Amino acid sequence: MPAANEVERALVVVAHPDDADFWAGGTIAIWTDSGIAVTYLVLTDGDAGGFDQAVPRERVPAMRRAEQRTAAAILGVRDVRFLGHLEGTLQPGRQLRREIVRVIRQVRPQRLLTWSPQWNWQRFRTSCHADHRATGELALTAAYPDASNPFAHPELLRDEGLQPWVITELWLINGPTPDRYVDVTDVFDRKLQALRSHASQTQHDGLVAQMRERIAPNAVAANLSPDRMVEAFQVVLNS
Ligand SMILES: [Zn+2]
């Protein structure tokens, strides 16, 4: 694994606006604070999300993109990109992989953070969304072998001059066997502020309690004091 100071750029590939902030917002804030340039690539506009039926559905994509940009900025992320696919429709396939490979070769990250393509039976509800697993499958296959193979999606090299790129670290959200714990206590307030920016999703009481409840088991698993706020990942080396 490259030393932390060898990681200059990280790419976060998620299914919906708010995925990154909910699951990895503290870790991402720590990365940007240490000088790592982080790019978000959000595959859908989360157009099936929210709870306010009075909001016309056609307004939802623009609203959620704006919320995502605000939340990202709070965490130090200035490069936020959207592919604009419809929520609930993500499927592994060559065309969508090519769209992700294009961004990998443009950004040239040493580190990729994305969803696990595997079920996590401990957190079946809320986290094992079909879009999440499809995103993991797509992003990991885009990372290897596609992004590093000049003969995969040859039009990206031929028409856009995008050279092959090897990502060395893969960080998975909600994998069945987490092995990396990040203590985000010191940036937890910023994470909450970012989450509140997703006003169409988080305008309800109990957000703090919900977050604490969700990540409390991570402190125990990491052998840290239960009052610490901890995010969990499975880290895979592409070597
Ligand atoms: Zn999601």
Image (spheres, rainbow, N blue to C red):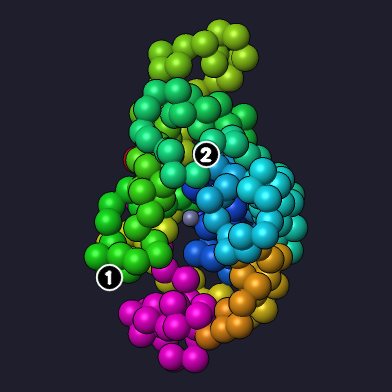
Residue 153 shown left or right of residue 189 in the figure = left
Q: Is residue 222 above or below residue 107?
A: below
Residue 186 on the magenta segment: no
Magenta-highlighted residues: 210-238
Q: How many callouts does the rendering have?
A: 2
Question: Which is more toward the observer, 160 or 198?
Answer: 198
User: What kind of element bears circle 1?
Assistant: helix
Residue 196 shown left or right of residue 83 in the figure = right
Q: Position of residue 2 (x, y in %)?
A: 48, 50
Which of the numbered marks, if any, corresponds to residue 161? Answer: none
Q: Residue at x 51, y 78 (%)?
A: 211
Gap between marks 2 and 1, in whole Å?
A: 27 Å
Residue 159 shown left or right of residue 238 in the figure = right
User: What kind of element bears circle 2?
Assistant: loop
Give the residue pinned by disc 1.
122
Q: Residue at x 68, y 66 (%)?
A: 199
Q: Residue at x 36, y 48 (%)?
A: 130
Kind of residue indicated by mark 1: Gln
**Mark 1 or mark 2, which is nearer the start of the sequence?**
2
Q: Is residue 27 above or below residue 85?
A: below
Give the residue pinned by disc 2.
86
Question: Which is more toward the observer, 43 or 38?
Answer: 43
The crowding category of the residue bearing disc 2, from other C-alpha atoms within 10 Å (few below 14, some 14 to 19, many at least 20), is some
The C terminus lies in which quarter of the figure?
Answer: top left
Q: Position of residue 212 (x, y in %)?
A: 50, 83
Residue 227 on the magenta segment: yes
Q: Say which of marks 2 and 1 sits in front.
A: 2
